[in-house]
Amino acid sequence: MPKLTVNGVEVEVEDGSTVLHACEEAGVEIPRFCYHDRLSIAGNCRMCLVDMERAPKPVASCAMPAGEGMVIRTDTDRVKKAREGVMEFLLINHPLDCPICDQGGECDLQDQAMGYGFDSSRYEENKRAVEDKHMGPLISTTMTRCIHCTRCVRFATEVAGVPELGAIGRGENMEITTYLEKTLASELSANVIDLCPVGALTSKPYAFAARPWELSKTESVDVMDAVGSNIRVDARGAQVMRVLPRLNEDINEEWISDKTRYAIDGLRRQRLDRPYIRGRDGKLSPASWDEAFTVIAAKMKKAKPAAIAAITGDQCDAESMFALKTLFDKLGSGSIDCRQDGTKIGGARAGYLFNSTIAGIDEADALLIIGSNPRTEAAVLNARIRRNWLSTRMPVGVVGPEMDLTYDAENLGDDPAILADILSGKSKFAAKLKRAKRPMIIIGMGALARNDGGAILGQAHAIADAYGVVAGDWNGFNVLHNAASRVAGLDLGLTPGRGGLDVDGIYKAASADKLDLVWLHAADEIEEAMFEKTFVVYQGHHGDRGAHVADVILPGAAYTEKDGIYLNTEGRVQYAARATFPPGEAREDWTIIRALAGRLGINLGFDTIDELRGAMFELVPHFADRDEIKPARWAKFGSKTKMTSDAVGTAVETFHMTCAISRASETMGQCLMALQADAARDAAE
Amino acid sequence: MSIDARIAENQPESFAFTSENEAEIKRIVAKYPKGRQASAVMPLLDLAQRQHDNWIPMAAIELIAKKLDMAEIRVLEVATFYTMFNLKPVGKYFLQACTTTPCWLRGSDNMMRCIKDRFGISSGETSACGRFSLLEVECLGACVNAPILQVNDDFYEDLDYASTGALLDALEADTPLPVGSVTGRSGSEATGGATSLSALKPAE
């Protein structure tokens, strides 16, 4: 723990800290461009120069290790002159196009030129000009603005694990590019836009759309996957303009996936903005709320409780699921299921949570992945696994198809029988698990959303018991969900009650015309054909698969348009906030269910969101603990039935299109096409 | 200058090292600790360039990346960083003219002018006959015998307009002059002959 003095203030910093850290510790701001907390140190921008006693010239504080007894000054004339000099050199080749640059208003170069720069330029020669590069449909480049900090290169290589960005040439001719200008093939690629301290890399879909100061900023939570990345939703009027990451060390650090960031243009297309009723001619026609409720109420009053069923979707807020569950309880139907993919989970909480927590990945020293591709299912979480692997080279085994996870993973095969081999110690990977002090299992929906999912879960439980995956304060048994609403749904008990049907049962009953009414609550990952004979109410925000089979459509709100509670795959309770209002006549989802209950003469016991939350917290008290996780006790789960020999797959085939919003997104479609085009070109070579 | 402008327009379909070079690669890679095989990237690029008419095609870059378990962009970064690696075809005689201060003071401009007059080429260009390419380079580290013109691997020193012309004549006739100073001095001896330590001169 070296002690040093910064501008006369004595500070003590941790071993391995740099002078820059020490300055921050002392409350002194150090300007920088190339240095970033989460990337390796490059030391090439020279903006962080400080004076060090007995040093003949200013030192780069980002790369200088803090030493005992150092005396640092940042307020001398020499430091001021050095910063002005560096700024002047950086600006020599930087265009003065701030008025037409998207970075304007949130630009490090702009801010630091203002704070530390010289007031005028002495440079009269021609400025350098650089051709723009193609980096795919997300990243817009204006390479003349590049100051060669290489943050993007380091991010792609270190964090994203796709070493495709680089700096070619040297000196004045240095240029940042991808190899042969291919699309950057990473699910995290757009984070380089946030990292770029200037306007060289900007957001293509957001190009020239808005200025930062005209946006209203709402802190919220992402629902594109079950990681629950913290986001900031920037809206102008009724439109969500962009989504940016929000710092949360325990979840997404400061990254978000490209889908989180760019699927939002799907919020503007294919929207359900008024109720619809399917007429005798089989066509949906617009209707009023009153007409829609009349049709549903008539059906519901006639229906037997056992012949009413509900399926909830992957992006529902806890409030609306609770409201629907309450309504079904009052109606006397137990046929309600939040597992639209037919996952065989539920029961003991430890059997459906990411028990180690996402931050716990940092501590693992061996990892077994079963039926999951974390890269496509939870890109930000995968970056954490990669970081652990980079520093510890922990062994990673995969039961599932061959895939590129951005780290070395040993493919053990895709036969579920391998799990039995691991359990018996016959598999080679068993020894690696045995040696590990903190082994971890990640089991995905590819292994659980199948008929023998319960048996695979049981087998994984047995492996966890046999290899010390759960020991002391360590619980490395992790279920990786894809659905943002799944954990909340399971905690709320949206699984079939006594005599109730699960999703498979609902399919069977519906196709045999034994159901009077099926309520699809934003459930779009369904088999539409099963519902042809049944009366279907679709409550949701997009005209996607569910709406196609609906007889009555009730327009709801998307995740940016309502206040809602979501539990991520760890079971962390997070509050999303409304950034814009739902379009047209669409309403927040819980109010729709409340209004229908009123029409049916049923008292749900709440009239406001606070009353609803109050009732919900009585059922599940831990939902009130914002940003907290209620740890699950290790218990019995899974079944002892036989596994089939069907190959274990993964749940997400195409990263860019997994939900109604991302399917409606033009940007996601472009990403998919760009990747397919690059893949086709590679295959042709 | 984008990457397209830096590399040759016509790229060969594939590239493979000769069996002698493959053996050489084994020897080179073995010099570095295990897991640090990427350190061999420069000698391998050099081998590829020597094997492939003094320029490196993209196929070779991709092959080297594969051999050394590196990302392709990392090899391209190295290949574009050093002026000694040619990514476009060059003539049989690749002239690298030093124009850094000592050479410039000693008349490198005359040497450049002579080449320009003869072939009409400036730095980065290849003559109409396709046999001569010129590149202006930074210090070649032989300042005592400035100015220097490097022809492929060989240094020609103490050049002026006339002697550059004579050198180019010889190259055109494919009868290269002896390597070293064109004035005939040995190594970096004083131009006016030895002035001191003459007593130590070995008897002739």
Image: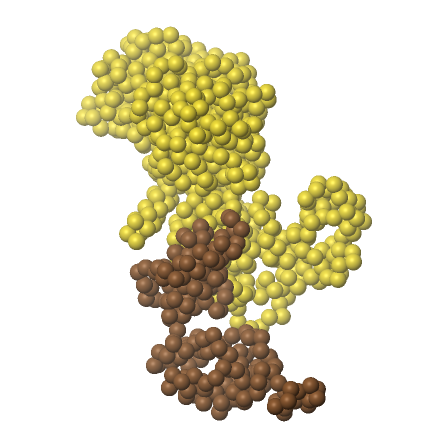
**Residue in front for this viewpoint, A527 or A569:** A569
Measuring from the top left, give residue A496's x and y in whole percent.
38, 13
Which one is nearer the viewer's eye here, A395 or B17?
Answer: B17
Asked if one can make out residue A227 in the rendered structure from this viewpoint, the answer is yes
Residue at the (25%, 21%) spot, across then down? A531
Q: Which residue sits at x=60%, y=45%? A: A37
The quadrant of the picture occupied by the N terminus of chain A is top right
Colour of chain B, in one word, is: brown
Colour option used? by chain
The residue lying at 45 percent from left, 47 percent from top is A162
Foreground residue, A623 or A48? Answer: A48
Chain in yellow, by letter, is A
Query: Is A512 situated left or right of B4 in this image?
Result: left
Q: Is residue A247 left or right of residue B24?
A: right
- Of all residues, the one furthest to the left in this rendering is A281
Figure quadrant of residue B3:
bottom left
